[in-house]
Amino acid sequence: MSERSAGTLNLIFLGPPGAGKGTQSRMVEEKYSIPQISTGDLMRKEISSGSSFGEEINGYIKLGGLVPDHIVISMLLHRLKGDDCKTGYILDGFPRTVEQAKSFGAALAEKGSFLSGVIAITVADEVLALRLGDRRVCKKCGATYHLFHNKPKLEGLCDNCGTELSRRRDDEPDVIANRIEVYHQQTAPLIEYYQNKNKLHIVDGNKKIDVIFQQICGIIDELS
Ligand code: AP5
Ligand code: MG
């Protein structure tokens, strides 16, 4: 059984762009009633607000690079102060560098809190590009679809809120290629980092969405 603060479930979902972190972490949010926190979503929200801070962030995201550690860490730690995080959370896309992981570990230790586990979803690079190219998202509620593997009930419309679906601006082929490259260079080292801490659980992300979800639930239930 993994280390766990009494009654809390603090999870990290790790994986390359298009691995299914958002898809799976939203399903986990619903089943386990803990919030899914995507640093990508937090930053896209800031960009949509039209603030100059959002503009600065967009400069990194539109090219597929990482937003500087100090910006992401401060946004994330602020979000974790929310009342809804008291019994746990699922971090989707954070940390993404060893520096972020160390800062987060230090912040947890300061609060006397623990990481329950890290779920790393693995998918081959050539599959990632196909998934992202045909992804469609709902800008209103954040739901994610795929033109072939995860279709909405009504073409082009979100199942949850009926909003017209759109393509993410960083889902263009050249930006996707850069995001995958950045993942290998800056984020993949976290696999070893968390393995050394005995926190890592690897899931094969090439299977069907429901099959992967069952496997993830099995891991989470073992952490309880
Ligand atoms: P972020 O929003 O986190 O994007 P990402 O990591 O590139 O990952 P994605 O959201 O593209 O993929 P996903 O794994 O969530 O896959 P999804 O479930 O959608 O970050 C965006 C940007 O923000 C970064 O590039 C960076 O600039 C910045 N940023 C964010 N966090 C940061 C941080 N911590 N530090 C610095 N910068 C940061 O699935 C993909 C598609 O596949 C969907 O269409 C889905 O329906 C489909 N699908 C899912 N599972 C399956 C399956 N099993 N079979 C078939 N299709 C599937
Ligand atoms: Mg995502």
Image: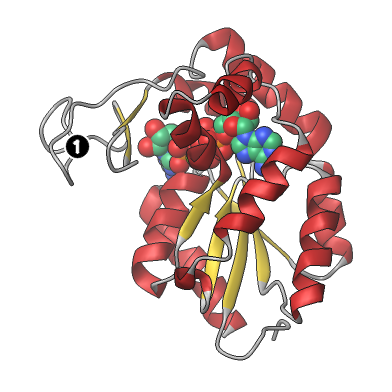
The kind of secondary structure element at disc 1 is loop
- Which residue is farthest bottom? 6
Q: Is residue 85 left or right of residue 98?
A: left
Query: Which residue is more in the foreground, 205 or 64?
Result: 64
Please determine whether, in this image, residue 33 is positioned above or below residue 201.
below
Tell me where residue 186 appears, x and y as whole percent: 81, 34
Tell me where residue 63 appears, x and y as whole percent: 63, 14
Q: Is residue 221 visible?
A: yes
- Which residue is farthest right? 196
Question: Can you say which quadrant of the picture contains the C terminus?
Answer: bottom right
Q: Residue at x 74, y 26 (%)?
A: 182
* Quadrant assignment, res 211: bottom left
Q: Residue at x 79, y 48 (%)?
A: 100
Query: Which residue is more in the foreground, 110 or 137?
Result: 110
Q: Residue at x 57, y 72 (%)?
A: 219
Amino acid under label 1? Cys
Badge 1: residue crowd in 10 Å (few <14, some 14–19, many ≥20): many
Whether label 1 lies within 8 Å of ligand 1 gets the answer no
* Quadrant assignment, res 181: top right
Please determine whether, in this image, residue 128 is positioned above or below residue 70.
above
Q: What residue does disc 1 label?
A: 158
Q: Is residue 18 visible?
A: no
Query: Which residue is more in the foreground, 146 or 74?
Result: 74
Q: Residue at x 85, y 56 (%)?
A: 102
- Which residue is farthest front? 52
Q: By what rule are the colours in the image chosen?
A: secondary structure
Question: Can you say which quadrant of the picture contains the N terminus?
Answer: bottom right
Tell me where residue 99 appears, x and y as whole percent: 86, 46
Please determine whether, in this image, residue 111 is positioned above or below residue 150.
below
Tell me where residue 30 appears, x and y as whole percent: 34, 65
